[in-house]
Amino acid sequence: MKRHGFSGQPASHGNSKTHRAMGSAGQSQGGGSRVLPGKRMAGRMGGQNCTVKGLEILEFKGDTGTVILTGAVPGPNNGLIRIMPNLNKWQEWPQLKTVEEQTEAVAQ
């Protein structure tokens, strides 16, 4: 129901224990008595990996190993993400500065 946005069957008027049941899966005559490809049914939902490009690194804290990013970061708050170098071969991995190095650069 959640996967495809189905509303379910009625809660009353003679419906017994089939409120979240699928219902009909297709015709029995004329369609070859089969379930057509692409029929929306129950199955796994979520759990896919996604790659987001163009995120900007705001700050890197070396003592705690924390990286602060800006942009459309996928996943829940305080979740774990994997940061990889850009896939373009002509760009190099940026040299990150720790908070201590940044404060020393500002002080000078």
Image (cartoon, grey):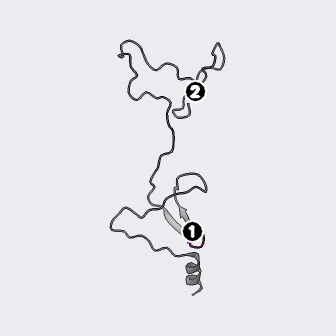
Q: Quadrant of the N terminus?
A: top right
x then y, percent, for residue 94: 44, 71
Q: What segment is highlighted magenta in the picture?
A: 61-65
- Say what secondary structure mark 2 lies in: loop
- Dominant secondary-structure state across the stretch colored magenta: loop
Residue 63 vs 55, above or below: the answer is below
- Say what secondary structure mark 1 lies in: loop
Q: Are marks 2 and 1 in contact (CB under 8 Å)?
A: no
Q: Amino acid at mark 2?
A: Ser
Of labels 2 and 1, earlier in sequence is 2
x then y, percent, for residue 52: 45, 55
x then y, percent, for residue 21: 56, 23
Q: Which mark is residue 65?
A: 1
CA–CA distance in space, label 2 to label 1: 45 Å
Residue at the location (41% across, 13% down)? 28
Q: Nearer the viewer, residue 3 or 62?
A: 62
